[in-house]
Amino acid sequence: MRIRPNIFRAGTGPLHAVRPDLPGTVMPGRDVTLVRWEIDPQRAATGLHAHPDHEQFTVVVSGRIETSVDGEVVVLGPGDVCRITPGSSHGATRALGPEVAILVDVFSPPRQDYVVAAFGER
């Protein structure tokens, strides 16, 4: 098994093609998976989706986003956190304003599909 880094520096991590509409930097852990996303304000909104087996927390690091959770559209800014329960429809996420929005998603249990897509192993 390949040893993965324990430090992920902003702007230096590899971008992994874990979603067709948005590349991100996957940070695998034993009990959770983190993904750091950079959403350019010129990028179209992401698609709506759900994951029945994973709870997700989205933390806005910088910038502002508009997103939908179970049909409710919300605007989130730096320091805001959104909890998405398993099975909830969510997405249609886009950056607001002129700057790139940086988000960190925390998934529990770990997103093995993201880990495999990023690193090619289970």
Image (cartoon, rainbow, N blue to C red):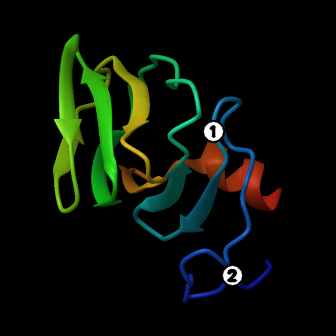
In the structure shown, which secondary structural element does the residue marked by tag 2 occupy?
Answer: loop
Answer yes or no: do the residues labelled 2 and 1 have beta carbons within 8 Å?
Answer: no
Give amino acid for label 1. Leu
Residue drawn where x is 83% and y is 56% of the image: 120
Quarter of the view holding residue 32: bottom left
Give amino acid for label 2. Arg
In the structure shown, which secondary structural element does the residue marked by tag 1 occupy?
Answer: loop
Q: Which residue is mark 2?
A: 4
| Front residue of 50 and 16 | 16
20 left or right of 110? Answer: right
Instruction: Identify the disc placed on residue 22.
Output: 1
Q: Quadrant of the N terminus?
A: bottom right
Q: Position of residue 30 (x, y in %)?
A: 47, 70
Q: Position of residue 43 (x, y in %)?
A: 59, 33
Q: Is residue 25 above or below residue 46?
A: below
Q: Position of residue 24 (x, y in %)?
A: 61, 53
